[in-house]
Image (cartoon, rainbow, N blue to C red):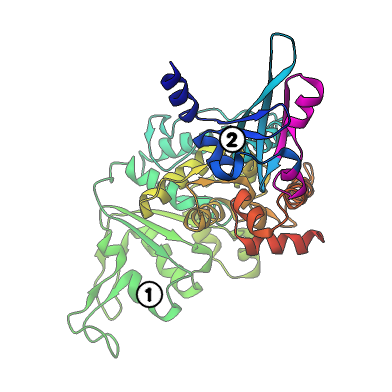
Amino acid sequence: MKSIYEKAFQHNFDGICVFDHEGKGLAINQAGQRITGFTKEKFVGETTKNAIEKGYISKSITNRIIQTKKPVTDVISIQGLEVLVTGNPVLTSEGELQYVVLNVRDISELNNLKLDVLLSIALRRKHQSVTPKVSSIDVAGVHSDDVISASPKMKQVVQLAARVAKVDSSILILGESGVGKEVVVKLIHENSARADLPFIKINCAAIPRDLLESELFGYEKGAFTGANQQGKAGLFEAANGGTVFLDEIGDMPMDLQVKLLRVLQEFEIRRIGGTKDIKIDVRIVSATNKNLQELIEKGDFREDLYYRLNIIPIHIPPLRERPEDIQQLAHLVLNRTNRKYGLEHYFQPGLVELLHQYEWPGNIREMENMIERLVVTAEQDEISWSSLPFIIDQPDLSENYSLKATLEEIEKKIILEKLQTFRTTRKVAQVLGISQSAVVKKMKKYGL
């Protein structure tokens, strides 16, 4: 039995420390040595009084039990580590104190999780809407792994896209930059009769003006200096039978707008330097984040072309107007980024609640960039909410929730408490899971 007790003592997950009735160390198990940093040789014979005087412990549970002969539970600091200690007195048959047995558990990670849970609860009270778990597959009979439509507004977009995918009418996709216009266009193409035929995207703002015409319509041999001697087919020809996506259509030059209008009216093109028309069969979908009607009034966009492009308008709402999509989008982007880099990062509980509070002026594109940055810079697999302030600390935060002020106040309190407990920025950085330079920077920010 003595052997069994010894093995149970040494292999207990929690640290166990035994003192005599005067507070002198008698025994410490392996977990106790690991958690407290005391070796067996250093612990045995050491008194709690000396440990306090030397700064090894912040206060003594053992001394309180010696005085009261009653169990005590408290959080203390042992050599800079925050631990939860439960002490119990062992009394003789006459009621005299014989030993004090302490159970010691490292709660630095538990404490961080507790704070995160408290923050999550507070944010949920401010943000009462519950994110419905709606699959990105089979909305209105449409299949897509990339379109998230948990919100009512995006459901309407997907349902409309499903209906118009079956016809060849021109579609104009409207919405702010980064809302996911290309994703919706691909959804339309993939659920159309042209799904197995080419899908070609043309960014009207990215191709230099003097090259755009030749890229779109192609050219015959010898059409201009430097031209390919065999000539070249344009993107409209390459897309024959499929779908052409004209992104940033509001940036198309006026002279090319005339040629595009002919494509929409006659479904034929003529190469640069050519003398014959070439019939094409394409579905044209265009997109812009600009107000085309304002461009028409300024004389920068043809009104007749606008009406040809705008047969079926689809407006994609900004991310701030569809908060129900944020949770699924965040995990979709996280999983995609993990696959890209062969990682297994995950969000700390409560982090997505913080994402709901941000206005997202850059929409989904901003979220993608933010999450990728968090993934590739994270030192651990868990992405903590404490990593977010440098990203969401911007003046565009929703005034309704004052999240910036809340985060700063909590962050300041955490750092101050850790500094008082651990004294060194190196240890504070280790406990918080951030770099020492980040701790110093935050100390300067809050005047600590």
Is 71 a magenta residue? yes
Residue matched to label 2: 324
Instruction: Tell me the tag on residue 336.
Output: none
429 or 149: nearer the viewer: 429
Mark closest to the chain's N terminus, 2 or 1: 1
Q: Residue at x 65, y 69 (%)?
A: 298
The amino acid at mark 2 is Glu
Residue 39 visible within the image:
no
Stretch of the chain drawn in magenta = 50-76
Q: Quadrant of the C terminus?
A: bottom right
The amino acid at mark 1 is Glu
Left/right placement of residue 407 relative to residue 15 reads: right
Could you tell me residue 431's position as x and y percent?
A: 62, 49
Q: Residue 282, located in which quarter of the rendered image? A: bottom left
Q: Secondary structure at mark 2?
A: helix
Residue 239 visible within the image:
yes
Q: Residues within 10 Å of mark 2 (few under 14, many from 20)?
A: many
Q: Residue 317, located in which quarter of the rendered image? A: top right
Instruction: Tell me the tag on residue 213.
Output: 1
Q: Secondary structure at mark 1?
A: helix
